């Protein structure tokens, strides 16, 4: 008789889902994941909130070029010696995510702030895209 192990069933289901979506889980246990992101727009520009709980700010790389904003980060999983893991629901591993930014925003003036596990990124509107008052001449 084989003993039922619900955790093994879940792991097998995860592996099937990974294969179906063309994803792989490396042998070292690191996984690739995509963090949750909020994107908002107002009169000043675009505002991103990228949720990175547990990520060291020194492991975050933010680049802006060719109308693309890219963020890369890593949250390694350090397995203590002699510890048996039964469930691992935290997001560990590396991720990379890119966003296409329209020309109406100025990627040369991006600012970023990391606070309480959230990376805040602001991209101001380009001067050409901002409303401006036009004086009407009277003859």
Image (cartoon, rainbow, N blue to C red):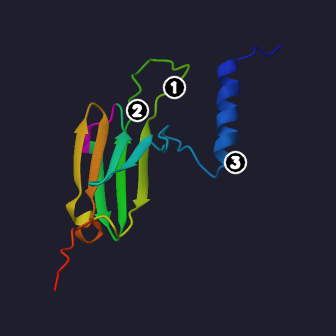
The boundaries of the magenta stretch are 54-58
CB atoms at circles 1 and 2 under 8 Å apart?
yes
Distance of label 1 from label 2 (alpha carbons): 10 Å
Placement of 131 over or under 111, stated as above or below = below
Q: Is residue 56 magenta?
A: yes
Q: Nearer the viewer, residue 63 or 42?
A: 42
Q: Which mark is residue 20?
A: 3
Dot 1 or dot 2: first in sequence order is 2
Distance of label 2 from label 3 (alpha carbons): 25 Å
Q: Residue at x 67, y 41 (%)?
A: 17
Q: Secondary structure at mark 2?
A: loop
Q: Say which quadrant the C terminus sits in.
A: bottom left
Q: Is residue 104 magenta?
A: no
Which image quarter: residue 54? top left
Q: Is residue 104 left or right of residue 109?
A: right
Dot 2 or dot 3: first in sequence order is 3
Placement of 4 over or under 44, stated as above or below = above
Q: Is residue 126 left or right of residue 4?
A: left
Q: Nearer the viewer, residue 136 or 88?
A: 136
Q: Is residue 42 left or right of residue 2?
A: left
**Residue 98 position within the rendered picture, expressed as x and y whole percent measured from the top left:** 42, 57
């Amino acid at each position: 008789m084989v003993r039922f192990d619900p955790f093994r069933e879940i792991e097998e289901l995860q592996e099937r889902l990974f294969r179906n979506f063309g994803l792989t889980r490396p042998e070292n246990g690191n996984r690739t994941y995509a963090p949750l992101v909020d994107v908002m727009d107002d009169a000043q520009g675009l505002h991103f909130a990228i949720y990175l709980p547990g990520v060291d700010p020194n492991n975050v790389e933010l680049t802006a070029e060719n109308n693309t904003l890219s963020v890369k980060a890593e949250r390694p999983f350090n397995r203590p010696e002699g510890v048996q893991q039964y469930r691992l629901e935290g997001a560990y591993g590396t991720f990379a995510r890119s966003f296409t930014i329209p020309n109406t925003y100025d990627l040369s003036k991006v600012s970023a702030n990391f606070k309480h596990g959230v990376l805040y990124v602001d991209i101001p509107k380009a001067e050409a895209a901002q409303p401006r008052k036009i004086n009407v001449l009277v003859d």
